[in-house]
Image: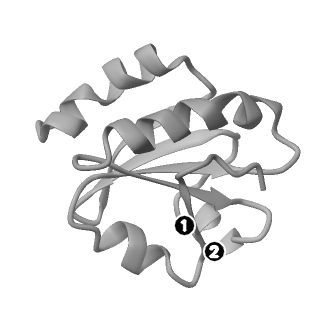
Amino acid sequence: MIHAAGVDEVTDADFDDEVLRADRPVLVEFTADWCGPCRQLAPVLSALASEEADRLKVVQLDVDTNPEITTRYAVLSMPTLMVFREGEPVKSMVGARPKRRLLQELDDVIQGRSS
């Protein structure tokens, strides 16, 4: 898996604990080794994980080795970015994007407002 520095990896086994029971919103990148746009997104996610750590948890899930969660949320394209708050998916985005645009799209979630 393309690992973004400062971004934890979650698996089928620990997804519920790490994402659904988290104490703040969680941005999950559904990713794969063969995904070119995922490589482009890695530095963006690293920066976001560092800069927004107090308000947003950022994790990655490898779709090839974690089919249960990938199927549960009907993820078909990589990268898919899904935000979870209080155990529920509240926002979904497909494709790489620059940090500025991603922050704009995540603003309501980071601020604690409905998306």
The quarter of the picture where residue 62 lies is bottom right
Check disc 1 and report the residue beneath it. 72
Q: Residues within 10 Å of mark 2 (few under 14, many from 20)?
A: few
Check disc 2 and report the residue beneath it. 68
Q: Is residue 43 above or below residue 102?
A: below
| Cβ–Cβ under 8 Å for marks 2 and 1 | yes
Q: Secondary structure at mark 2?
A: helix
Q: Secondary structure at mark 1?
A: helix
Residue found farthest to the bottom? 13
Q: Is residue 66 above or below residue 49?
A: below
- Residue at 53% of width from left, 53% of height from top? 7
83 relative position to 23: left or right: right
Q: For residue 9, say whether it is visible.
A: yes
- Residue at 59% of width from left, 77% of height from top? 12
Q: Name the amino acid, label 1.
A: Arg
Judging depth in this view, the residue of 10 and 67 nearest the camera is 10
Judging depth in this view, the residue of 28 and 90 nearest the camera is 28
Q: Is residue 89 above or below residue 64?
A: above
Residue 25: percent from left, percent from top: 27, 52
Q: For residue 115, say whether it is visible.
A: no
Label 2 vs label 1: CA separation?
6 Å
Q: Quadrant of the N terminus?
A: bottom right
Q: Is residue 65 above or below residue 49?
A: below
- Residue at 72% of width from left, 60% of height from top? 63
Residue 34: percent from left, percent from top: 88, 44
Q: Name the amino acid, label 2.
A: Glu
The quarter of the picture where residue 26 lies is bottom left
